[in-house]
Image (spheres, grey):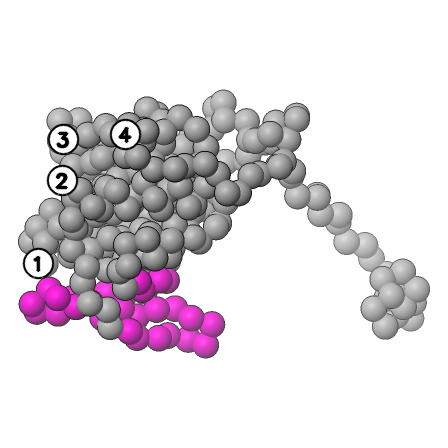
Amino acid sequence: MKILVSIKPVPNPDEKVKIKADGSGIVSENIKVIVNPFCEIAVEEGLRIREKHGGEVVVVTVGGEESEQQLRAALAMGADRAILVKAETVLDSLAIGKLLSKVVGTEKPDLVLLGKQSVDDDNTQVGQILSAILGWPQATFASKIELSADLTKATVTREVDGGLEMIEVALPAVVTADLRLNEPRYASLPGIMKAKKKEVRVVAAASLDVDVTPRVKILSYAAPKQRVGGGRVADVLELVSKLRNEAKVI
């Protein structure tokens, strides 16, 4: 069974991100870039499926040369090989979906896994767009994936507003990973050493004959307003007065 896992490099969410003075983006200097946590969960699920059913796990990302570092991190976890679709410009979700569809057409996987969203822009779009382009079934926000004995179907438990929803999709399909799908493993030292020798195939985005003209343009970035600390009141009467006259909520 071949499993294709799409990953996205993102700034480490544990570090404080600063906005450029002109609002054109974030200050990338001295910011560590990691595999998007939801994508890391997708890689882990691919590895678990391979361990149970056999096959191959291929990881892919779209980005510049520096994105190879995150591919190597996925290879260190245990993925078999990687593909870097080299694109030096910022692409929107539709362009990413189109490029990934070309990779799917070449690799012909039985299952495509992605993180449900990235922690930098939170668009939650690429998996759905890819499914639509391919004409494949999709199961988003997966908290559990079970494959049939003949590997022709997947039963996916989805996290929805009202609780859990269970659906069955025919393979090949696109599935996006939610937070509670699994706990990703740490890369072992032998895994890190092996990752250095594993194949990373570089494909120029321009060679895939895809129109990547952005349909969405980010006009500017801005930091959220700083929260103001609370205050103290002497008694209930003063509290009610502030709620009525200042906050105007009563």
Which callout, 2 or 4, points to the residue nearer the camera? 4
Which residue is tagged 2?
80
Residue ID at (60%, 29%): 24
Q: Is residue 143 magenta?
A: yes
Which callout, 4 or 1, points to the residue nearer the camera? 4
Distance CA(mark 3)–CA(mark 4): 23 Å
Q: Are marks 1 and 3 in contact (CB under 8 Å)?
A: no
In this view of the protein, which residue sits in the foreground, 102 or 10?
102
Q: Is residue 198 magenta?
A: no
Residue type at numbered disc 3: Lys
Q: Main secondary structure of the magenta part?
A: strand
How far from the left and from the top, in percent, is residue 93? Answer: 43, 45
Which residue is tagged 3?
198
Does the rendering let one see residue 198? Answer: yes
Which residue range is magenta in the image? Answer: 138-167
In this view of the protein, which residue sits in the foreground, 104 or 240?
104
